[in-house]
């Protein structure tokens, strides 16, 4: 591992480069910022070998792009692509994005927004149930969101005009884009030819991901899988792993290797391991954080911890239900256009890669029980918090307690602090690190009372007037690491 041989004065630079590529997967001259690509080019050789050795990832670095090809061990619906306004992509936006990439791959050096829309509209005619009608505002907005996602990564650059003007009135507005073909080609690089896949599961496993050793021994493959989980998930719980992965997670050497590469600090508990990202450069969600949702989530976590840790009034406990990915696989597979699927390139039974035979039966992990709280208690608690602090919430949430509850629970579940089950929530062990939330409300100075909306965003209201911290000394400054930004 090259990180161990790098001079201590340069180690911080190397670790920053590792965090950038693990967080973004695609880096260009302008995305995520202008200093990222030169940093990665400096450490390209060392990173290429370390990422392949530790995770089985492949890294390609050129003059204009750096592209990491990760390996998916399981499907995850929790990291969707998002618009520039942080709205989650729906199926239509994903479809427009894919078709826009296809059109840009055949275009020249420039294209107008209306020309790109016409080409995408022509492609949609070949897809049942999909349409791009330029005279329909919802279609135009979705298409502009897809183009905005590409523009944020530098695949297209606005040369003239305004996409918003075209979205408002395609007859009066127009936009001209320069096309960066190297980025367009770097964006879409699936591990296998999609038209030959009979199931989305064909995109999983090291064999599909292009790891350094697709036929490596089972122990080495399991170690890479555990390291991948550490940088991809906010928390890795031991009860979710099989042997030998549970034993590997408990090994200090394996966790230390990831710490050394990323510069993050691991929190080890009996239940699992979490990498704590105080830099904020490897996490797509910073928690604790500012804004109504993050701070209400922290308040709710504190209320939950107080209830669960009250030994005089024990709460109901339940085992975690098995979470097979069959439903998600079925949903994705049902979207494959059957008329374009050909015979698979590989045996469908081998899509997860070769496994070594073993005569010894796998040891089954002990299934722990977790505290269970009913949905009604969660709703009532958020209502109580709203009654108490609602005047400091962002305006959109003050009258929408149900919507606030749903978004806050979704955030906690995304951070792997709770798990949504029928009738309520299972409380996962990592939530305890945010126990004892303390609220401090300061009176805004008179000079601050007259800030314009541009000076004070709506969702900053709670952050400016209410400070929420946690009694755990690490909770108030650390951010749980999720490693990948949305939509990478």
Image (cartoon, rainbow, N blue to C red):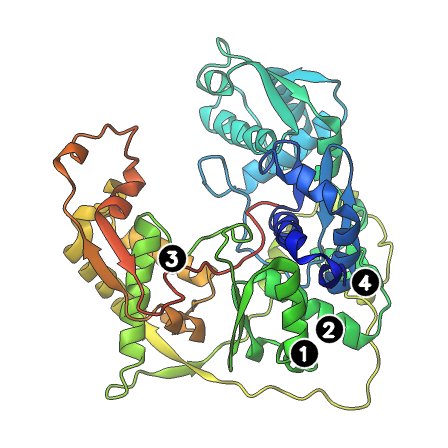
Question: From this viewpoint, is residue 202 visible?
Answer: no
Left or right: 93 as drawn, with respect to 382: right
Q: Earlier in the sequence, mark 2 or mark 3?
A: 2
Q: Earlier in the sequence, mark 3 or mark 4?
A: 3
Verify CB contact (< 8 Å) between mark 1 and mark 3: no
Q: Secondary structure at mark 1?
A: helix
Q: CA distance from mark 2 to mark 3?
A: 32 Å
* The one of 97 and 73 positioned closer to us in this rendering: 73
Left or right: 385 as drawn, with respect to 473: left
Verify CB contact (< 8 Å) between mark 2 and mark 1: yes
Relative to 253, residue 275 above or below: above
Q: CA distance from mark 3 to mark 4?
A: 43 Å
Question: From this viewpoint, is residue 135 visible?
Answer: yes
Position of residue 396 measured from the top left corner of the image (x, y, whole percent): 27, 42
Position of residue 90 measured from the top left corner of the image (x, y, whole percent): 52, 42
Q: Earlier in the sequence, mark 1 or mark 3?
A: 1
Identify the residue position indicated by label 3 in the image: 288
Which dot, 3 or 4, sits closer to the camera?
A: 3
Q: Secondary structure at mark 4?
A: helix
Q: Earlier in the sequence, mark 1 or mark 4?
A: 1
Relative to 292, residue 268 above or below: below
Identify the residue position indicated by label 4 in the image: 348
Q: Residues within 10 Å of mark 3 (few under 14, many from 20)?
A: many
Identify the residue position indicated by label 1 in the image: 248
The residue lying at 71 percent from left, 25 percent from top is 180
Q: Residues within 10 Å of mark 4 (few under 14, many from 20)?
A: few
The residue lying at 84 percent from left, 78 percent from top is 356
Position of residue 17 measured from the top left corner of the image (x, y, whole percent): 65, 48
Identify the residue position indicated by label 2 in the image: 222
């Amino acid at each position: 591992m090259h990180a161990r041989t790098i001079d201590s004065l340069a180690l911080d630079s190397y670790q920053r480069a590792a965090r950038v590529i693990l967080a973004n997967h695609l880096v260009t001259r302008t995305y995520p910022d202008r200093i990222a690509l030169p940093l990665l080019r400096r450490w390209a050789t060392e990173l290429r070998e370390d990422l392949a050795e530790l995770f089985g990832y492949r890294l390609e670095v050129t003059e204009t792009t750096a592209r990491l090809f990760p390996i998916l061990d399981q499907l995850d619906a929790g990291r969707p692509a998002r618009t520039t306004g942080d709205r989650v992509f729906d199926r239509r936006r994903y479809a427009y994005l894919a078709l826009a990439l296809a059109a840009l791959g055949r275009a020249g050096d420039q294209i107008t927004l209306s020309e790109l829309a016409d080409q995408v509209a022509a492609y949609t005619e070949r897809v049942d149930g999909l349409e791009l009608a330029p005279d329909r505002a919802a279609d135009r907005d979705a298409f502009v969101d897809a183009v905005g996602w590409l523009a944020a990564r530098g695949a297209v650059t606005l040369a003239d005009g305004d996409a918003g003007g075209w979205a408002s009135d395609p007859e009066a507005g127009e936009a001209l884009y320069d096309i960066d073909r190297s980025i367009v080609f770097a964006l879409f690089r699936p591990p296998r030819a999609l038209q030959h896949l009979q199931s989305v599961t064909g995109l999983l496993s090291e064999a599909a991901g292009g790891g350094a050793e697709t036929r490596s021994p089972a122990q080495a493959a399991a170690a890479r899988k555990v390291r991948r989980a550490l940088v991809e998930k906010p928390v890795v719980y031991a009860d979710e792993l099989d042997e030998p992965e549970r034993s590997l997670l408990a090994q200090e050497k394996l966790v230390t290797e990831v710490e050394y590469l990323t510069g993050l600090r691991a929190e080890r508990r009996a239940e699992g391991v979490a990498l704590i990202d105080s830099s904020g450069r490897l996490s797509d969600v910073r928690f604790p954080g500012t804004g109504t949702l993050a701070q209400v989530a922290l308040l709710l976590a504190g209320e939950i911890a107080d209830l669960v840790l009250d030994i005089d009034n024990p709460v109901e406990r339940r085992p975690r239900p098995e979470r097979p990915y069959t439903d998600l696989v079925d949903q994705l597979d049902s979207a494959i256009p059957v008329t374009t699927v050909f015979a698979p390139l590989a045996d469908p039974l081998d899509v997860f890669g070769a496994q070594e035979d073993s005569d010894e039966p796998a040891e089954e992990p002990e299934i722990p029980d977790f505290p269970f709280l009913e949905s009604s208690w969660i709703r009532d608690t958020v209502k109580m918090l709203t009654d108490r602090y609602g005047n400091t919430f962002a305006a959109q949430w003050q009258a929408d307690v149900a919507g606030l509850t749903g978004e806050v629970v979704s955030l906690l579940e995304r951070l792997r602090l709770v798990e949504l089950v029928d009738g309520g929530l299972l409380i996962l062990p990592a939530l305890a690190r945010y126990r004892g939330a303390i609220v401090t409300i300061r009176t805004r100075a008179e000079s601050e009372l007259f800030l314009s909306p541009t000076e004070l965003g709506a969702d900053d209201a709670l952050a400016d007037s209410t400070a929420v911290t946690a009694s755990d000394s690490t909770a108030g400054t650390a951010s749980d690491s999720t490693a990948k930004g949305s939509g990478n």
